[in-house]
């Protein structure tokens, strides 16, 4: 006579449910990693844009440039990025100073960095 014994272990349904739970957790981790990577890339691009704006302002000051009031666009590449700088010059109350606003963006994108400064032809 044979004795039937119940074997302990997991059923196929339990294993499949566990695999679904683990796969959902892994997908959530992958999404978080992708968001962190994108955030790091965006921060790098914004940092390079700010460096480009600071370089433009430093160059204007070193050249003692005193352009007339108006607006102009210049390429201002930084590393592998082909950035575009928009320079806006405005008169101030004191005729010895000009306010400059430098906006840096990608050729087809929003403004990544904006920097304001003053220019003077005085030594």
Image: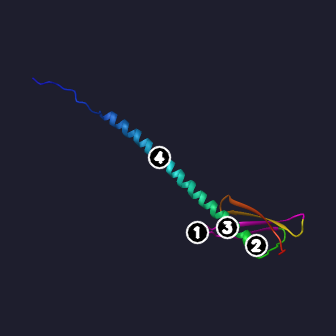
Q: Is residue 8 above or below residue 95?
A: above
In screen coordinates, is 55 left or right of 80? right
Q: Residue at x 77, y 72 (%)?
A: 61
Residue at disc 3, secondary structure: helix
Q: Residue 90: image x %, image y %?
A: 84, 65
- Would you name the residue on which mark 2 appears? 60
Q: Residue at x 64, y 60 (%)?
A: 46
Q: CA distance from mark 1 to mark 3?
A: 12 Å
Pointer 4 or 3: first along the chain: 4
Q: Residue at x 55, y 54 (%)?
A: 38
Q: Badge 3 local density, few (<14 within 10 Å), some, or many (20+)?
A: many
Residue at disc 1, secondary structure: loop
Residue at disc 2, secondary structure: helix
Q: Nearer the viewer, residue 46 or 12?
A: 46
Q: Is residue 89 above or below residue 19?
A: below
Q: Nearer the viewer, residue 95 or 106?
A: 95
Per the rendering, the mark at residue 52 is: 3
Contact between labelled residues 2 and 4, with CB atoms less than 8 Å apart: no
Q: Is residue 61 above or below residue 28?
A: below
Q: CA distance from mark 1 to mark 2?
A: 23 Å
- Would you name the residue on which mark 4 appears? 29
Q: Residue 39: image x %, image y %?
A: 57, 54
Q: Residue at x 25, y 30 (%)?
A: 8
| The magenta segment | 70-93
**Quadrant of the snapshot with the C terminus:** bottom right
- Write down the quadrant of residue 111 in the picture: bottom right
Pointer 1 or 3: first along the chain: 3
Residue 105 lies in the magenta stretch: no
Q: CA distance from mark 2 to mark 3?
A: 12 Å
- Would you name the residue on which mark 1 appears? 80
């Amino acid at each position: 006579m044979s004795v039937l014994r119940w074997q302990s272990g997991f059923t196929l349904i339990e294993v499949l449910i566990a695999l679904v739970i683990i796969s959902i957790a892994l997908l959530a981790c992958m999404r978080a990693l992708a968001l962190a990577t994108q955030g790091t890339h965006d921060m790098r691009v914004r940092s390079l844009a700010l460096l480009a704006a600071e370089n433009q302002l430093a160059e204007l000051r070193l050249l003692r440039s005193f352009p007339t009031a108006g607006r102009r666009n210049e390429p201002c590449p930084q590393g592998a990025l082909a950035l575009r700088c928009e320079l806006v010059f405005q008169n101030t109350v004191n005729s010895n100073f000009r306010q400059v606003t430098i906006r840096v963006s990608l050729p087809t994108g929003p403004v990544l960095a904006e920097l304001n400064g003053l220019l003077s032809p005085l030594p």
